[in-house]
Amino acid sequence: MNYAQMLKPAIATVPVYEPGKPIEVVARELGLEPDCIAKMASNENPFGSSPKALAAASKALCGAWMYPENSAFYLRSRLAEKLGVDFSMLSICAGSNEFLYLLGDLFLAPGVEVVMSRPSFITGKIVTLLYGATPVEVPLRKDLSQDLDGLLAAITDKTRLVYLPDPNNPTGTVCTQAELDRFIAALPDHVVLVYDEAYREYRKEMPDLIPHIRAGKKGICTRTFSKIYGLAGLRVGYSISSPELAELVNRVRPPFNVSVPALAAALAAVDDEEWVEKCQMLNAAGLAQLREGLCEMGLECVNGEANFVLVRFGASAMDIFAKLQQKGWIVRPVRNYGLPEYLRISVGTPEQNAGILDALRELLAPSAL
Ligand SMILES: Cc1ncc(COP(=O)(O)O)c(C=O)c1O
């Protein structure tokens, strides 16, 4: 018997997660110097990590020989204080992705349905299929925003989770507080809303699900230190839910899943308001810079509020992707999200934004076509 014959049947249906291409890989493949390549493909923070977090992580490395404190007491206590929620409502994971897997452990099995937008962040679908459950995908509206009424209409007796990233990835589109309020109010009692807030810090006004959770609605907010705090490589995120759901999440969480330096970095990052404010400002300016430049070239940008922009290039999207890469600009094709005419570009430093706009101007000049 070979491995393929031994697998759980669900595994064959699971799409492979395609990360943005690392700089080293592109350098090797195209014979470019790594220093001449900019990665604008994974919605990372182009300004690096919170300096306070980095200093704390470096210091914590001395304790690397010990297992981490498994309850994440200090990080949860500080978050509880900062966010005004009870300690028992918080769980800590190795990045917000991991919560989706733990919710899969808790609620998903063959015969169960998960409602989500098509497209939305691919981990929602991957996890659903991994557990043999059925993704029920609701198309986006014409403007590529999520169709909340459509999501509600897709709920059946078999639904256990609704996955709602806000802002959505790869589109960047957002829901308003009023839309979220209406949505959660209409959610039946046998369904948990998974509200993925990975890009929350980039929004001017982020809707708040916590009052609904306090009022007894079934929901979980998942958040991350990967984006504005610049700690994607350390893998740490947290969730806010009812104490009952947090306890269940903790029950299936792998022991010691968040490393000693990651816990220390996150604890310091929570209080690095200066860093957050600086990156919010720089991102807003960078997003405007990119959108303006792209619009001047006659390209259509999706209306979003994150640290990336989804741009329509039409039938030549993959060609532009390849040519940008040859010039040292890594962006993200979104074919696998069912958007073959679009590319997703992460906001970079002002110099990177200007550089990629110049590269695109060259590629799109009539003489180059
Ligand atoms: C919507 C969304 N959720 C979650 C994640 C993953 O975050 P983490 O690094 O915390 O696992 C991403 C990463 O790109 C994302 O776009």
Image (cartoon, rainbow, N blue to C red):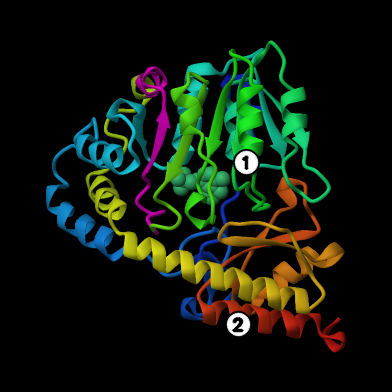
**Residue labelled with disc 1:** 122
Q: Using the rendered view, name the quadrant where residue 368 is placed.
A: bottom right
Residue 271 higher or lower than 138, as above or below? below
Magenta segment boundaries in residue numbering: 230-249
Report if residue 39 lies within the magenta region: no
Residue 168 higher or lower than 244, as above or below? below
The answer to whether residue 311 of the structure is visible from this angle is: yes
- Residue drawn at the location 55% of the way across and 31% of the way down: 194
- Residue drawn at the location 24% of the way across and 35% of the way down: 72
Quarter containing the C terminus: bottom right
Question: CA separation, marks 1 and 2?
Answer: 29 Å
Q: Using the rendered view, name the quadrant where residue 334 is placed.
A: bottom right
Report if residue 240 lies within the magenta region: yes
Residue 159 lies left or right of residue 249; in this view the side is: right
Query: Residue 281's x, y, as percent?
Result: 48, 69
The kind of residue tagged 2 is: Gly
